[in-house]
Structure formats: structure tokens, C-alpha cells
Image: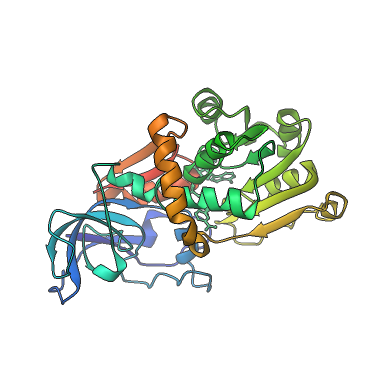
Amino acid sequence: PREVQLTSRPVGWPTADDFALVESEVPPLADGQLLVRNVVMSVDPYMRGRMSAAKSYAEPYALGEAMHGGAVGEVLESRAEGIAPGDHVLHGLGWREVAVVDASQARVVDTSVAPASAYLGVLGMTGLTAYAGLTRIASFKPGDIVFVSGAAGAVGSVVGQIAKALGAGRVIGSAGSQEKVDYLVGELGFDAAFNYKDGAVRDLLAQAAPEGIDVYFDNVGGEHLEAAIGALRLGGRIAVCGAISGYNNTEAPPGPRNLVRLIQTRGLIQGFLVGDHYDLAGEYAQKAAGWLADGTLTSRETFADGIDHAVDAFLGVLRGENTGKMIVRL
Ligand code: NDP
């Protein structure tokens, strides 16, 4: 089997030369472990941070070792009670075709209820990020006018649909192509959307939300964040989820120049990490299952096939080549 290793720490945009696809050794199973053949793996924007040496909330990837991340695989062999060959498990040893996983770090998922990929996206980490950020961090209330950036992506597309389902006054999204804008309005039920490449975000947002916004769910940072602060209404809330517009910058972007507007609006701005909100996972899973069943929530995925395309898929996420969750099928 093969695995993807990080071979050098990218400065600015990563390239294929920063990674190597190598043959891996599969160690013998110890008690409590599973031999897993990965079926799908996740490539996520946060992984860009782990490629740098700078200490963050997640440990940097080691050079010359397999990277890791969310994956779902089929159990080939089990030395753990309660998990049998043929079961599918969600675990953290992606970026490889075959993994030896501690059963304590794996969760059995039911692939007859939803496809394996859903547990990496709408029913998994990115779905929960959307739900926790919107309901807990941004304290969403029915009637709120909600703006979300990265709106056609894995997290953003769920944010907008959940906001509608929970009774938002209006939902506005931004994304990087006309095709994505059409998807948001035509298929996901957003009230308005714009392509942020069409002009100044401040102007595009003012057109899409002339009455201002109550909630901004930030996936992008930079110019978007400043525009949202400028559009915030009295008592508005901003959940800072990500800042992908700057992940490949070699210098920090300038801060929002209009932060002082938060005084006038009594605005709140709060960052969050999904890892702190797994207490909401059960509640979210139940609601999401209902919304998926009745069509309130739909999820599109963009697939790449084969571990030899995993790096391309990761770079594709940074470039916006995905609509919905980017998934690598192995
Ligand atoms: P997405 O599926 O949204 O993929 C990333 C998207 O970002 C791309 O499709 C692209 O779409 C967009 N993008 C890339 N560059 C830019 C740019 N310069 N300006 C604006 N948009 C850009 O990824 P996820 O849903 O997995 O993640 C979304 C955000 O949420 C990320 O910032 C991520 O780091 C963050 N996150 C945070 C978590 C937390 O716990 N705080 C947990 C999970 C994710 P487009 O074509 O529209 O440009």
C-alpha cells in the first residue's frame, strides 16, 4: 500500500514537490487495533497550517512521515472487541491506503444509512462546524440576516442551508465563480449570492444585503471580514471559522481597518474550533439526518480518485476547484 508524506515545508503556495507518494510498511496488529483499508479520505484547508512548522492548535506534520486526517475505511482484520471485519470506521489516519488504527481512536459508521463520504462532510466534522458556529458561536436567531463566505464549500453550504431551515430572514453567500453563485441560489435556496471576484466585496455585499447583516459566518477572512464588519447591524455577531484567503500568504494580511465599528453596533466577533463542540454532535446528527431525509439539506461532493490524486485534490481545495466537500476515493 501507499501513503503520502510531506517532504518539505511549503512557503507560500504548496506544490506537488512538497509531497511524496511512497510504499508503506504495515506493522502487525497489536491487541486493540484494527487493520483498515481506507475507502475515502478528507483533504481540508486546515491541513495547510499543519504543513508549516509554526505551532498551532494542531501539531505540525512531521517531514518524511505520512500525513494524517479524517478517513473512513473498511475493517479487514480486528483485534478489538465490538468491531468486526466488514465494518466501516471513521478515524484519523487518512493520506494512506491502509492504516493500523487503535480501536479507541475509531468510530463505527453505518454506510447503509449514508455513504462513507458523508461522515467526512455533511454528517461529519464540516457539518458540525457549520452547526456549532452558526447556532452556538453566532447565536443565530430566527429572522437573522445571515451572510456566509466560502458558501459553496463544505462548511459554508451547510451554514446557509441550516440558517434557512432555522428561519433566517435572509441568507446571502459569496463564492468564487458564477457557477457556484448559481448553485447557491438555484439549488441551495440562498436568497442572494455574489462572486467575490466581480468587484470590491464591500460593494457586492451592499448590493446583496442592502439592509445589512445580523450574522457573518467567516470562512475567508481578509477583505470579506472587513466588508462584513461594515455591514453589521446593531447587535450583530461574527463567527470566525477560517481565513482561507490568507493561508498561503507569507505575510499576515492587514487587520480589518473598521474594527471600531463594533462599538457603534455593539458587535461581537468570536473565533472557534469545532473540536470544542463535539457535545453538539449527537444533536446535530439527529437534526441533519432529518433535514437530509426531507430534502431541507442537500450536499454535493467533489471527488478525486486514487491516492495518487490526493495532493492535487488538496491543492484544488485551496484553489476553489471543489463545490461542497472535496473527497478522495481510494
Ligand atoms: P471548502 O470546502 O469551503 O473549500 C475551501 C474553499 O475556499 C474553496 O472551495 C474556495 O472556494 C474558497 N477559497 C479559496 N481561496 C479563497 C480566497 N482567497 N477567498 C475566498 N475564498 C477562497 O473548505 P471547508 O468547508 O473544509 O473549510 C471552510 C473554512 O472553514 C476554511 O477556512 C477552514 O479552514 C475552516 N474550518 C474551520 C474549522 C474550525 O474548527 N474553526 C473546521 C473546519 C473548517 P471559492 O471558489 O468560493 O473561492
Query: Looking at the image, which residue is at 73% across and 42% down?
Result: 214
Examine the rendered structure and indicate whether residue 257 appears above or below residue 316: below
Quarter of the image for the N terminus: give it. bottom left
Query: Looking at the image, which residue is at 50% across and 63% down?
Result: 49
Taking the view exactly as shown, the residue that stands out farthest to the right is 264
Where residue 153 sits in the image (x, y, percent)? Answer: 49, 41
The residue nearer to you, when weighing 42 against 315, is 42
| Relative horizontal placement of residue 135, taking residue 27 as reference (left or right) | right
Quadrant hosting residue 185: top right
Where residue 142 sits in the image (x, y, percent)? Answer: 66, 38
| Relative horizontal placement of residue 319, taking residue 111 as reference (left or right) | right
Examine the rendered structure and indicate whether residue 29 appears above or below residue 170: below
Examine the rendered structure and indicate whether residue 82 appears above or below residue 30: above
The residue nearer to you, when weighing 77 against 167, is 167
- Colouring scheme, one of rainbow, by chain, secondary structure, one colour: rainbow
Q: How many marks?
A: 0
Tell me if residue 168 can be seen. yes
Query: Looking at the image, which residue is at 65% across and 31% down?
Result: 198
Taking the view exactly as shown, the residue that stands out farthest to the bottom is 30
Where residue 150 sits in the image (x, y, percent)? Answer: 56, 42
Where residue 188 sits in the image (x, y, percent)? Answer: 51, 29
